[in-house]
Image (spheres, rainbow, N blue to C red):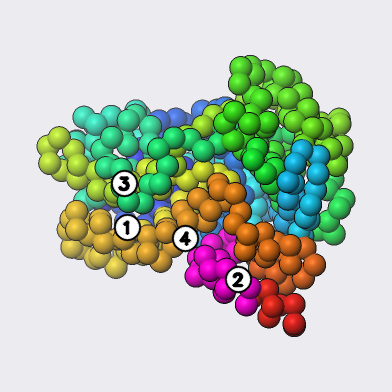
Amino acid sequence: MRNIGIIGAGQAGLQLGFGLLEKGYTVTVYSDRTPEQLFNARLAATTYLFGRAYQYEQELGLDFWKGPGEYARGGDLDVCPAPGQRALRVQGRIQNPGKALDLRAKYSRWLAEFERRGGIVVVRDVDVDALEVLAAGHDLVVVTTGRNSFTRLFERDAERSVHTQPQRNLTAMIVTGMKPLNETPFPALKFILAAGHGEYFSMPYFDRIRGPLNCLLLEAIPGQGLDRFGGVSTAREAMERMKQVLRDFSPWVAERLEGASIVDESSWLTGAFTPTVRKPVGRLPSGRTVMGMGDVVMLNDPIAGRGLNSASKQAHAMTQAILAHGDQPFTPDWMEQTFEHFWWTEGQFITAFTNMLLQPPPPHVLRYLGAASAVSPLADTFFDNFGEPQRFWPWIASPEETEVRIQQAAAA
């Protein structure tokens, strides 16, 4: 069987590893940290894993955290044209809910499980020189982490990368003591669109130590009213800033945080990055090639929760492509064709949906949201399509087709 090397022990790398291991492949995962170090690391990302992406890891027997606390059954969106003003409220159900899980618990457990199932785990830092050796020793090396300057190996795709700088300054935190969202009849992902300033999200969340809690993400347009977290150095200070932001922009949500606190100093983050699409073939100085996957080739802003979901879908597609390739060589042409297939079937819609949310909603989308505030099927479609953004196209790009959908749903 083929011998596959995977750089990175995150969603994309480990899910791919489990999928190939299940089919009898020899798979080595190179991780820069042990399971214990992954578990005890600082929070690096948060996201909600929607239905199909969640299903893929269930099929591999990787859902070790079952329970009601981390699930959201729908979404609740406030559209605010000015601070403290809610013009629209949209509530809808998600047909196939997923979950939000502390990735530190997930990846540490998965890495240990991968070795238990017969996979090979090598804990070491991998640089370009090491990649040269690994590329010579494996039939295929897949790079799934952007650390160690690996992104320099993968050419930026200028046609597909519309941004040249970060679009949001990010703040995320895991909190305890947050009051329930009683405005919805189901556990919900809460969204606030503060026009001209950014976005706020909260969700049911499964903490690595404490179990069911909540997670918050603030997406601030640089220099605008939500952008208040520069220079914050402690969890206490970050929580106080978050409370003040919500008092100013959405006091009806700020009440939920009155007695809340961040669970510990390692469970919050601030940062920013530039959304980028890169070409999938990484070319080493020797002329050997490696393949990129996950955030290395599709780095999206977290506003639509695409990072983890994209990684899961890419890993599933890559598994199928490797299995179908049999014993043929993994050439640069094959790498490009494999990525292009994913891009045209799913990747372009993931990126387009994310980029759409980073811009002010066009009039026809606001018209849709206004109708969805009164017509439940429209609201259900909006939130359910977060898990499958390709279902928004082509109608979401056309004012005429969007209006047809509004009229059909209203008539029904």
Under mark 1, the amino acid is Phe
Q: In the image, is residue 186 above or below residue 111?
A: below
- From the top left corner, tell me how far across and down residue 197 is, in percent: 65, 37
What residue would you read off at disc 1? 339
Q: Which is more foreground, mark 2 or mark 4?
A: 2
Q: Secondary structure at mark 4?
A: helix
Which residues fall within the magenta stretch? 385-404
What residue sits 21% from the left and 29% below the top?
A: 129
3 vs 1, front mark: 3
Q: Amino acid at mark 2?
A: Thr
Crowd class of label 4 (few under 14; some 14 to 19; many from 20; radius 10 Å): some
Asked whether residue 163 appears in the rendered view, the answer is yes
Q: Is 163 on the left-hand or right-hand side of 235? A: left
The one nearer the camera, 306 or 406, is 406
Which tag, 2 or 1, sits closer to the chain's start?
1
How busy is the neighbourhood of tag 3: few (under 14 within 10 Å), some, or many (20 plus)?
few
**Of the residues under marks 2 and 4, which one precedes in the sequence?**
4
